[in-house]
Amino acid sequence: MDQTGIYVNFGVNGLHFTRAMFDNGCHSYMAISDRLQRKLQLPTLLIRPRTLEQVAGVDYNAINRVSFFDIDIDGHRQRRVWAYIIPQMQQDVILGLPWARSQEVTIRHSDYGDSLHIGTTDTYVTLRKDPTWTTDNSTKVVSAAVFSALARRNYRKQKRVNIFAVTMADIEKALDKLNKKKKPTDPKTKLPAYYHDKIDMRIFTPEVVGQGYLPPHRPGVDHAIDLEKDEYGREKEVPYGPLYNMTKEELLVLRKTLTDHLEKGWIRVSRSPAGAPVLFVRKPGGGLRFCVDYRKLNEITKKDRTPLPLITETLQMMAKAVWYTKLDVSAAFHKIRIKEGDEWKTAFRTRFGSFEWQVTPFGLTGAPATFQRYINDVLREFLDEFVSAYIDDVIIFTNGSLDEHRQQVLRVMKKLQEAGLQLDIDKCEFEQKRVKYLGYVVDSEKGICVDPEKVEAIKAWEPPSTVKGVRGFVGFANYYREFIPKFSKIAQPLTNLTKKDVQFRWGEAEQSAFERMKQLLISAPVLTPFDPERETRVQPDSSGYCIGGELSQLTDNGQWKPVAFYSKKCLPAEANYPIHDKELLAIIRCLEQWRSMLQSVQSFTILSDHKNLEYFMKKQQLTERQMRWALELSRYRFRIIHQAGTKAVVPDALSRRDQDLPKGLDDPRLSGRSHQMFSNKEGSLSLNSLSTMLCTPSMHHVRVGATWVLGGDKDQEDDEEPIRDNPPVCPFTESEPNLRQLWNRALEINKRYWLLRNMVREGARQIPPKWGLPISISECSVDDGGRLLWRDRIWIPHSEPLRTAIIQQCHDSALTGHPGRDLLKAIISRRFTWPGLSQDIRQFLPNCDICGSKAVWREKRRGLLKPLPVPERQWAEISVDFITDLPVSKSGATNVMVITDRLFKSCIFRAMKQITVEAVVEAMMECLVEHHGPPAAIVSDRGPQFVSLMWGRMCSLLKITRRLSTAFHPETDGSTERMNQELEAYLRCFVSYYQDDWEQLLPVAMLAINGRTSSVTGISPFFATHGYNIEPIEVEEKLRTTGRTPIAKGEALIAKLQDATEMAQTMIAAAQEKYETYANEHRQPAEQFRVGDKVWLRLQNIVTDRPCKKLDWKNAKYTVKELVGSHAVRLDTPPGIHNVFHVMLLRRAADNPLPSQILHEPQPPAVLKEGDSEWYNVEEVLDHKIGKDKKLKLLVKWEGYTKPTWEPEEELTMTEAYATYRTHTDVSKPSQRRKKRRGSP
């Protein structure tokens, strides 16, 4: 590999920089030296050894490794690029011809040097032709004297030395070349001679404004930034953004821009607390554009509703004119000062400090309205007489002689110059008879007519050449059939072509209907004039290769009628944008096309079928391309609303015109869709086994294409018997006997495969329409093995077992690891294809139980909020919970039982030594039932106390309804969980250092918490119970009131308490409704399950006996046994697990596998994990004894374990095994079995 060549700056992983040689004679994508790989410690992968061949045909060292990394070439960034590692290569990096083709690289020559244009990101890269340029980045800054000494010494020794001297003059010179603009137009070449000596030519020189000129403050003209106010009446806080990392080039441009703006007085140093971030957008012709991101500031700025001139009124005034002149004000916003005192709000942050604008910057909301007021004030005496101004577009129209028109033009230009406004001579038009203005064409002879660009998308629609193209046009026209009389009769010839079993023939009748339909679509009553007072919407769409859009308005009769249409092919670089950017590009193009109309409305709606675009204006970090578009969008007032693609009939048809779609693989828009990263020496691949060919990471022939959504290659009864000579070679090797057998069987039974292969061989022109294959026969071929190919991929005959086997092996292989839909499709599409591949994959994947067990659910939470009923009275419904593991109190207690009244939120705290079911029942009777009577319902979790037989017996006797929460659904008992937090917070404030006096604090804590006003009811629980509040500060008693008897006082107190109850019920219901509305915004309705359904249960709270939770299953499949209400079901889970689960933990499992699909049903043996404790299934209690602590111990045999263990009795009181043991054994006496063992010999 020769050392000479052209070089570019090359960044690796954003940390290291070197040089890369661009060599269009290199046939590999990219290559790096082993020296650079070791130096940067880049990752490597082993590949099949291959030989590197030089130009002379001499074999070089063998290559057996590749590496991957991120690259940055002067702002052009690529992620995870693969490159060969070549031993002993002199160059650090070589960029090959495949890389250049994939990135649409072209070399451009100019007077300022050669550059590399990378089309995919529109980047210009400076080329270096010095092969001795150093690859070492280590540089030192030295003085001029040291530099001179080093240079002289190396000159004497005749050695090269890599020393560089850089001055500010060099930097300025480089920036001038980078931002070199085309030579400005001489105004006299475009300005009519009449004006040369009558107007100051400096009006066409914008630079004069910047030479130390700062517009003065003008009351009523300066741009004010009025902020919205919050709920407290205060102005919202102006946000500040982060500092973004910048390249060396960006820092140089930033410094130059700041210096330039400071000298002009446009900005000044700021101490503002605000600070918008600064970004750079690369210009289409090279160079960088300085931008400030004011999106956050615009969100909180009051909108200026200053109206723009009505287009209809302006056109009416212009209709009778004879002469027209258009003037364009340049850099309009910088002629307006920021209102004094508002400059700090425009502050932006840089690494050189904070600065704020003194003139109006681009990107501020309300700036167009401010300038419109100013231009109206400047030209007020001429407005509507012979002048109209629409922001920076000024038009002068004269219904008289040319001399009169010239006098009016002079008066207007002098007024503009007096106001300090300059004109862009390149955009001005003088003394015209016909001009285009605000989306219309104004002609002195013909009057006002529709701009041809509005309907160009329809006029340029070429006759379709396929049935699909006819369907697209007819569907587009059908959308406006109510405005077209006799639509069905006119469209009949076209409709006939879309019928089944009709051969496609385009004749005079079809052409006449097509042209007639186009003419009707672009004329009234279909097309309506634009009215800025009407509701307006834009519907853009991108098909990947073309952009389409419709501008429409709501008429007085409630119908949406089109104003304009738009359609344009994508450039090759645009066709390779990601989906998000393609859809955003469609919006940008439509807004640019209809700019004058859309800026005249207060606001408009954009309907997009890409939902993520709804949040585009709220994103923080944008690419350079997106930042450029965001600045363009900031000029409009709009909102983006998602609309399903099926409803976007018109823009979809405009973006999919038959003439705009690629006709073959040689279309430039497909050049970036597929490329061969690495190839072997022969330039082709041998057929290995299916697993190796599709799944190995050697990256041979990586090529992913689309498969058909529709199509049928299944044999029909009317298919003729094909000629079966020269059967195709089986593509599968001997290591795949099952696939080979299925292949041969498929060929025997599939006639249509043979027929299609013979048609391709014989050069047939089209595939029979009755087959329903939406492909072109020109894309099909037959390889040397006699196999039918579509786009160079092997066509698999129609055989469900064969196709399912291919999917199964590619999916289940350890080399692919059960990939998802898109990855599996990509893997299969490397070598195989068939109609309906996507549908087969979509049916296969949901029925794979291994995928279901590892799937992570990312959609909204299932199950809408269902609040508990509002209690009828105080203490009618309570909730119970425990605070456990507290320090041992002086009485020996370590737990607190918390009881909460669900109506007034009254609480009862009871210290407890143990929380066995007996102790809980006793405490409940003493502190609740004794004082307030038995409640009607108790809400609790599924703790062992509340699911025991004794607790159930107590509730049955007292007629108490148990409301147990479903497994792992703490929201059911949320009020008590909150009360636990309140009590813990109180105890933290007053407990002693040793924390052993918390029990003595419980009565005071209960009084304090009950005395707090509830945020739900608005009154304290203590007041609801007693009719008065406990105050922490004593005040003088009120004077006794006279005239009220004790009975009246009592009745008043009773009425007061009754009112409190009713108010509490109302407030709780309102709070529940409010919380339900808020919670359901982040949820989706649960699916309706049925008994017998197979469902996936999320195992987030359930553990198995496997060692590591990270590598364990995410979900397990069970069967629905019973429906428990609308939000819970009972499953056939193993014993020991609460088998009632909330629907948020469930997803219905698919039950429609492909007929030949092999199913796997892994099922983990599960035990319950609730909080920090685990519950195992007790198989049997074997024995009992009295331990050293004088407490009863039980010998327990656990299910699934061979060795029994001794456990405390209180841990097993709620189990059936212990209840069975006690019915046959008196645990108060020593075990007889233990006595026998002691007495045995």
Image (spheres, helix red, strand yellow):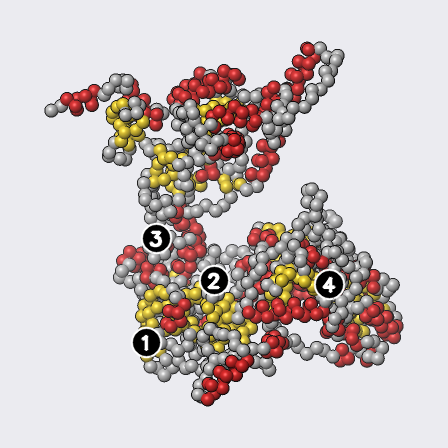
Q: Is there a contact, CB below 8 Å, between mark 2 and mark 1?
A: no
Residue placed under numbered mark 4 in the picture: 359
Helix, strand or loop at mark 3 = helix
Q: Count the numbered circles shown.
A: 4
Residue placed under numbered mark 2 in the picture: 775
Q: What type is the residue that disc 3 sits on?
A: Asp
**Badge 3 density bin: few <14, some 14–19, many ≥20, Cα 10 Å:** some
Residue placed under numbered mark 1 in the picture: 61
Residue at 42% across, 81% down:
3
User: Which comes before the other along the chain, label 4 or label 3?
Assistant: 4
Q: What type is the residue that disc 2 sits on?
A: Ile
Q: What type is the residue that disc 4 sits on?
A: Val
Residue 48: percent from the left, percent from the top? 32, 68
Q: Distance between the residues labelled 2 and 1?
A: 45 Å
Q: How far apart are marks 1 and 3 (CA)?
A: 37 Å
Q: Distance between the residues labelled 4 and 2?
A: 59 Å
**Badge 2 density bin: few <14, some 14–19, many ≥20, Cα 10 Å:** some
Instruction: Examine the rendered structure and indicate whether residue 1054 appears above or below residue 335.
Output: above
Q: Is there a contact, CB below 8 Å, between mark 4 and mark 2?
A: no
Q: In the image, 205: left or right of 1195?
A: right
Residue 32: percent from the left, percent from the top? 40, 72
Helix, strand or loop at mark 4 = loop
User: Can the viewer see residue 495 in this picture?
Assistant: no
Residue at 68% across, 48% down:
236
Q: How far apart are marks 2 and 3 (CA)?
A: 30 Å
Of circles 1 and 3, the one toward us is 1
Instruction: Examine the rendered structure and indicate whether residue 550 appears above or below residue 37.
Output: above
Quarter of the image with the C terminus in it: top left
Instruction: Examine the rendered structure and indicate whether residue 70 appears above or below residue 947.
Output: below
Q: In the image, 590: left or right of 556?
A: left
User: Which comes before the other along the chain, label 1 or label 3?
Assistant: 1
Residue placed under numbered mark 3 in the picture: 812
